[in-house]
Amino acid sequence: MTISNLKYQADSKPCGDKADMQTNVYHVAYAPAIKKAYLFHWGCNLECKGCLCKKEINCMALEENLDVVFRDPRFCPPQTPSATLSFGKLVSLLENIELTEVAFEGQEASLDPMLPDICWWLKDRGCKVILHTNGVAMADASHIDDVIVSLKAITPELYAGYTCRSNASLLDNFRKYYESGVNLKAESVYIPDYIGLEETEKIAKFIASVDTNIPYRMDAYFASGDNPWRPPTPEEMQIALAVARKHLKNVYCTQQTKKDLSKADLLYEVVSRMAACRSSCRRRGSNSRSAASTSRSSSGLA
């Protein structure tokens, strides 16, 4: 299956007075086989040292981005979206495809002032809505089905060192999301000798203090940005899983070990329906950007 860039073609304004209001959505990817769209948002309230967007800002499940994990960070200049969609253009784009599910990805979707309106429109159409968030800002979850919170670290000093911000509101908001009744999930990036076994156990214990049934996903770190860390081995990921499973009932991990992925390695094809970035980095060694964590864009990867 394939993920493609969706091109806006309609000129209509289906959203009344809000049609011209700007969203933070700069890229839309779509998996036709599962009728799922991925909306990528620009703008964040954290400065994570290992942010995936330091390497690639468009969907990493696109065929041209299957090399993201192993791109050399030294050849990855910063990317910036050249434009974002208005609410009306986003709706017109999505109206032209079959949809059952939509995920908010990219940087931090909770900062998009149009997020409640987008969610309302999607739910009115019968779509499942999934929010990926760092949890620092609390989103209106009244029209959201799943909330996936990237916890990063529990130790205040470690979290602040990695993100340049306190995690106090994040931990409080994680509990609030749970109490709201949404389907809550947690994730983090495993970085050996930094956010390693000790911190992983703290993360698992925190999640368990809310509910031991909350699913927890660990993503294996891969090089992104100017950092000294190394990726974990598959054996290290298995040890980390065992540590987390002492406290939680549903723990799993993602890790790409194959360097030369092709479309045959995808669970489903993803196509780009709309892409907008000034600096393109598509191949290793030539204007490429490096990535650190798959926590936001592992869609379609086996």
Image: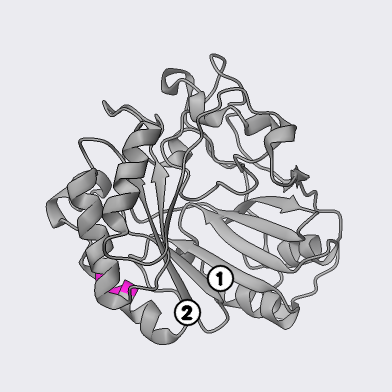
Q: Is residue 289 above or below residue 188?
A: above
Q: SS at mark 1? A: helix
Viewer-proximal residue among 169 and 210: 210
Residue 65 visible in the snapshot: yes
Residue located beneath label 2 in the image: 140
Considering the image in quadrants, where does the N terminus appear? top right
Q: Residue at x 49, y 61 (%)?
A: 132
Q: Amino acid at mark 1?
A: Leu
Residue 295 drawn at (x, y percent): 46, 49
Position of residue 114 in the picture relative to residue 184 (left or right): right
Residue 205 drawn at (x, y percent): 23, 65
Q: Residue at x 42, y 18 (%)?
A: 74
Q: Amino acid at mark 2?
A: Asp
In the rendered image, which quarter is residue 166 located in? bottom left
Residue 171 is a magenta residue: yes
Q: Is residue 37 above or below residue 57?
A: below
- Residues marked 1 and 2 touching at CB (< 8 Å): yes
Query: Looking at the image, which residue sits at the far top?
Result: 285
Residue located beneath label 1 in the image: 115
- Identify the mark at residue 284; answer none if there is no mark: none
Viewer-proximal residue among 67 and 108: 67
Q: How many marks?
A: 2
Viewer-proximal residue among 175 and 253: 253
Q: SS at mark 2? A: loop
Residue range highlighted in magenta: 170-174
Q: Residue at x 59, y 39 (%)?
A: 60
Q: Residue at x 64, y 28 (%)?
A: 261
- Sequence order check, earlier mark of 1 and 2: 1
